Amino acid sequence: MSAEPEPTLLAFVQYNQWANQELMALCATLDVGVVEAANPGAYGSILATFLHVVRAEAGFLRRILGVAPEPPFAWDGQPSLAQLAAFEAELSRHLQEMVRSVAPTQNVHEEGQGWSFDYEARLIFMSIAYHGIAHRTDITTFLSRAGVTVPELDVWGYQAAHPEQFGARIVRTGQGDAEA
């Protein structure tokens, strides 16, 4: 693989980390009762869902590289959102490096008792973004129902936060009132 990965793959991993961090920061301002409340039809409470997301990111690294950083907390020790956010930021740096250094078509081999599974690394690359989006949607839906105003976490929100990464610029022409 060339020294620089396909930019969209890297952008998806960067977007995923930004959206996770934005939502964790919002949730850190909420009452602990909201963060630990059951979320029927979803993975679990907000805290449990973020724990699952962060643990999965470590698992994505482990599946491709065979190793992943260990958190400074016990997975079953009920880490705080601040601890999860800090560790997620570290994992994201490793995920970005993995996308930079592993060819998307590199074979990934997994084995279990009575089975083996081979697939291309790009399946994991896609999973990073998809998994995060799915669970952030669960959380933002729950928060919206609870009356919490949630930030715009889609790719347009990311672009607004990082226009330099997309060559984005708005030119006002003075014609009409339409927003770009």
Image (cartoon, helix red, strand yellow):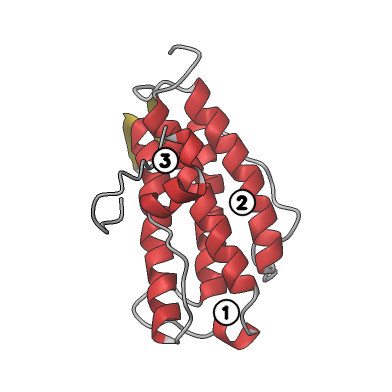
Q: Which residue is mark 1?
A: 35
Residue 113 visible in the shown view: no
Mark whose residue sits in front, 3 or 2: 3
Q: CA distance from mark 1 to mark 3?
A: 26 Å
Q: CA distance from mark 3 to mark 2?
A: 15 Å
Residue 86 marker: none
Instruction: Say what amino acid the circle numbered 2 marks.
Output: Glu
Image coordinates of residue 34 in percent, x first then y, are 56, 85
Residue found at x 64% / y 58%: 85
Q: Earlier in the sequence, mark 1 or mark 3?
A: 3
Residue found at x 42% / y 62%: 152
Q: Which residue is mark 3?
A: 12
* Position of residue 73 in the picture relative to residue 150 (left or right): right
Residue 86: name its quadrant. bottom right
Q: CA distance from mark 2 to mark 1?
A: 18 Å
Residue 16 visible in the shown view: yes
